[in-house]
Image (cartoon, rainbow, N blue to C red):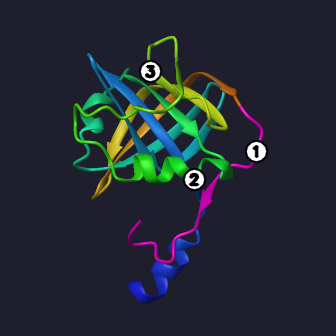
Amino acid sequence: MDKQDVGPALGKIVSGIYILTAKHASNETGMLASWVQQAGFDPPAITVAIKKGRYVVDWITDGAPFVVNVLSDENKQMLAHFGKGFPEGDPAFESLLIRRSNQGIALLSSALAHIECQVISQLESSDHHIFLAEVVSGALQNEGTPMTHVRKNGFHY
């Protein structure tokens, strides 16, 4: 494989920009996610890929709920807020308007939509954990256009 040829081609796979929110015991967090894809209609399902080494991977085990908050083009401030990441235990939602899902997980009020999910399966790639999750609820919260991202090179974010 010629990485100089493949990298730009892979980078043209368009991805959305999302904030994954999760809760584990009394801790909660949010993280920037771009590798989210619908993976089923009936029941509705999505896949989420999370880089190895992220502590949220330990929180999202089989059956663990999480929320995908779909960002709009109007949510650029969320990139700066969540893009830096949060050490485990640091408050991720200070100064943000949130609501709570039935499971108590943070829903970002300014997001375009939210999708509450429950992990049903997982597998590993060389550098990411890939979760298959059933969609258990969700709603469009605001009008707008989903934020998308095109990378220059498919070998890094």
Q: Position of residue 59 (x, y in %)?
A: 28, 29
Give the residue type that dot 3 points to. Ile
Distance of label 3 from label 2 (alpha carbons): 22 Å
According to the image, label 1 marks what residue?
144
Report whether residue 2 is seen: no
Viewer-closest of 140 and 73 = 73
Give the residue type that dot 1 points to. Gly
Q: Position of residue 121 (x, y in %)?
A: 39, 32
Q: Is residue 134 above or below residue 76?
A: above
Sequence-wise, the earlier of marks 3 and 1 is 3
- In magenta, the rendered stretch is 142-157
Q: Is residue 141 left or right of residue 121?
A: right
Q: Is residue 100 above or below residue 143?
A: above
Screen quadrant of the N terminus: bottom left
Q: Position of residue 92 (x, y in %)?
A: 36, 35
Distance of label 3 from label 1 (alpha carbons): 23 Å
Report whether residue 10 is seen: yes
Sequence-wise, the earlier of marks 3 and 2 is 2
According to the image, label 3 marks what residue?
105
Viewer-closest of 129 and 43 = 129
Query: Does the stretch in magenta take in 146?
Result: yes
Give the residue type that dot 2 points to. Lys
Dominant secondary structure (helix, strand or loop) of the stretch shown in magenta: loop
Viewer-closest of 11 and 32 = 32
The part of the image, by quadrant, that contains residue 14 is bottom right
